[in-house]
Image (spheres, rainbow, N blue to C red):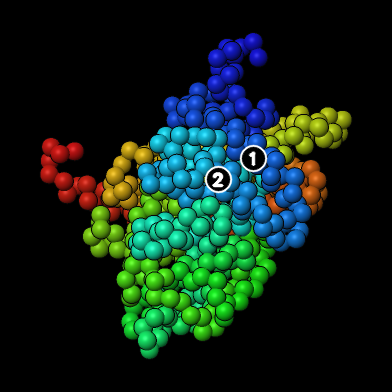
Amino acid sequence: MAALSAHTREKWLFGSKLPYAEAPWARGCPSPYYRDSHRQLRQAMRSWVDKHLIPHVEQWEEAASLPDDLYQQAADDGLLMPMAAGSSIPADWRGKFPVIGNVDPAEWDGFHDFIIHDEFGRIGGVGVENGLVGGVHWQTLAIPAIRRFGSEHLQTTIVPKILSGAGRIALAVTEPDAGSDVQGLQTEAVLSDDGSHFVVSGMKKWITSGMYCDYFLTLTKDAAGGFTLLVVPPSQGISKKHMTVSGSTAAGTAFIDYDDVHVSVNMVVGERGKGLKYIMSNFNHEVRAHNTLVSQNTLRPCPAIPGHACADEAMQRLFLGFQALRCARVCLEDSMDYAMSRQTFGKPLTEHAVIRFKFAHMSRETEALQAWIEALIYQLSQLSPAEAEFLLAGTTAQLKAHAGIVLEHVVREAIQIMGGIGLTRGGRGGRVERIWRDVKALTVPGGSEEILLDFASKRSLKVAAELMKEPKGRL
């Protein structure tokens, strides 16, 4: 370490010393994006994940369930509120809820948001994170939607309960026959004769963290016309059934069945009949807040480019990039560690040129993804929401597709290097094997690779066409 000064070692070295296991800003390379508060958060998150998650991940994945007290632990230790806030903590939340690492809420930015998710990813795979905090962060948009459109009653009762760990919430939109086409949903809400409550009937499907939740932010087809968004509290007539999927077993993915469930009218979010508008506009609004979810591939008219469609999932897509990036680093870390110790033909795997060639390609793709994500977070922080949507919706779609392509290649190569160890649940190859099962949980949601890449190209052409309309001398 003689080549590095004491200042560089103190400020810019952190975590694993294995090649490519950490981001450049943790390998001794200064970055303009990160400050002391980011380092402070990173250390706190790493300690929290090491203590509360990593020792138990295999057990939870095997049981397809998370312990009930883990959510309260996350709330008490200051993870929930920042994850609900995204890239900026609202002024009226500051001081009311803890922030992990005692980071000043006024300093919180998109890089803090990035770090908190990045450290979660060190467990390998995405099921635990999605199951634990799916009710407050990108996956559900439940808290952002209630905050933006909800009544004072909802703001002062439901939101504090969720952020304090006293309750859990999930977004319930997707149905067995209404995925990408949200307008095709059939769950119906009928207003009672006395006008005091709605009667809700129908089924929701693929509801992430649904098995753990008390409340469901539910989009319904209003019998009076349009779509009404309701916060459905714990009620008689609600049943939940766990969905077994190929990976992410601890995510608590569920069928939710509503059988004549009574929901008070004071649980309506916004106005009756305008729920679809709220859901779609909130997806788009969160371009700067780093929180979003919408059914796959849904597009809506973009006000910045008349007559064109823009990605409503922009920040879900960026978040999926966060997860894919750390998963790729985990694959690099574990396969490199294995290759340095595994002897074949009388020498370590790392002394075989073909193995070094694999690592060279795996790492160049991962480092490029890191740089692109960091640049995009910075760009989003410097633009207004309308500007960000105009300039970056296509870019974010392209990044999400790229992140999935990178991870699919990196995890495949990691398993090739590790052999049977990489296909064995638990043990030395456990994280890589879990990522292999979870990889489609990152590439499928948020839009397919084909649609996103096509959208990104069309979007870039539309942006160029709009810019060319600007009067000469203005650009």
Q: Residue at x 70, y 40 (%)?
A: 51
Please tell me whether residue 87 is drawn above or below residue 305 in the rendered image: above
Q: Residues within 10 Å of mark 1 (few under 14, many from 20)?
A: some
User: Amino acid type of disc 2?
Assistant: Leu
Under circle 2, the secondary element is loop
Label 1, on which residue?
48
Left or right: 393 as drawn, with respect to 86: left
Where residue 213 sits: x, y (%)?
A: 58, 64
Where residue 347 sits: x, y (%)?
A: 83, 29
Residue 80 seen anywhere in this rendered image of the structure = yes
Cα distance in 3D space between marks 1 and 2: 10 Å
Label 2, on which residue?
79
Where residue 25 sits: x, y (%)?
A: 54, 28
> Which of 350 and 107 lies nearest the eye of the viewer?
107
If you read the primary sequence from the N terminus, does the residue marked by circle 1 or circle 2 appear first?
Answer: 1
Under circle 1, the secondary element is helix
Which of the 4 image quarters holds residue 238? Answer: bottom right
Please tell me whether residue 214 is drawn above or below residue 303 in the rendered image: below
Q: Residue at x 75, y 52 (%)?
A: 58
**Which label number is shown at residue 397?**
none
Left or right: 308 as drawn, with respect to 99: left
Q: Quadrant of the N terminus?
A: top right
Do residues under tags 1 and 2 come within 8 Å of each other at their CB atoms?
Answer: yes
Left or right: 87 as drawn, with respect to 211: left
> Which of 423 and 29 lies nearest the eye of the viewer?
29
Residue 357 seen anywhere in this rendered image of the structure = no
> Which of 308 and 84 lies nearest the eye of the viewer?
84
Left or right: 287 as drawn, with respect to 99: left
User: Amino acid type of disc 1?
Assistant: Trp
Q: Residue at x 59, y 43 (%)?
A: 77
Q: Quadrant of the C terminus?
A: top left
> Which of 324 and 464 lies nearest the eye of the viewer?
324
